[in-house]
Amino acid sequence: MQQTLSIIKPDAVKKNVIGKIIDIFESNDLEINQMKKIKLSSENVAQFYAEHKNRPFFTNLKDYMTSGDVVIIVLEGENAIIKNRTLMGATNPKEAETGTIRQRFATDISQNAVHGSDSETSAKREIDFFFPKI
Ligand code: GDP
């Protein structure tokens, strides 16, 4: 069993498709281990996306990720990391395969409905970031 972190981003929360996205996870044998709906601060986003801090779209990313509530989910299942990335589709929804979450629900390349950890190392870091062990 493997765990990965998913975020349903503000554009998808505003479109009222949290349930539709969770249904895709559950229909593909990913279970919800932990989940919370919160509003991120700029500091949260700067820390979480530290690897992107010098990218030209970073200010845009911070404004977007703090523009409304997000749903943070720890998903669990066999090959959860790669499975979630496949279900999400490409970063740019124009390039995302038909039926993927981003093809169905993303607004554009910057407002693209979901985040998913891209490796075991990032999954561990991201899960600890939002659900620190007490
Ligand atoms: P992901 O792992 O597929 O989410 O993609 P990245 O880690 O490369 O990028 C993180 C997030 O930054 C993406 O999901 C988008 O919300 C945003 N982003 C990435 N590339 C671009 C871009 O070229 N322009 C804009 N405006 N936003 C981007």
Image (cartoon, rainbow, N blue to C red):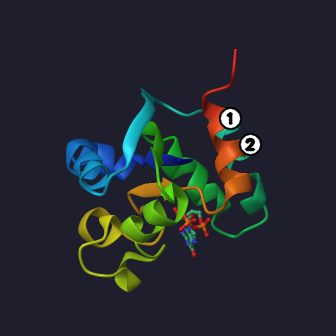
Respond yes or no on whether mark 1 lies under 8 Å from ligand 1.
Answer: no
Q: Are marks 2 and 1 in contact (CB under 8 Å)?
A: yes
Q: Is residue 60 left or right of residue 7?
A: right
Three-letter code for the amino acid on which mark 2 is drawn: Gln
x and y percent of residue 48 in the render? Answer: 68, 45
x and y percent of residue 34 in the render? Answer: 46, 30
Q: Which residue is mark 2?
A: 47
Secondary structure beneath dot 2 equals helix
Real-space CA distance between mark 2 and mark 1, rounded to the nearest whole angstrom: 9 Å
Q: Is residue 69 left or right of residue 23?
A: right
Q: Which residue is mark 1?
A: 129
Question: In what quadrant does ligand 1 lie?
Answer: bottom right
Q: Residue at x 24, y 68 (%)?
A: 104
Q: Residue at x 38, y 71 (%)?
A: 108
Q: Which mark is residue 60?
A: none
Would you say residue 69 is visible in this rendering?
A: no
Three-letter code for the amino acid on which mark 1 is drawn: Phe
Query: Where's the C terminus, which quadrant?
Result: top right
Residue closer to the observer: 18 or 133? 133
Residue closer to the observer: 46 or 32? 32
**Viewer-nearest of labels 2 and 1?**
1
Q: Earlier in the sequence, mark 2 or mark 1?
A: 2
Q: Residue at x 61, y 32 (%)?
A: 130
Would you say residue 32 is visible in this rendering?
A: yes
| Rendered position, 60 above or below 86 | above
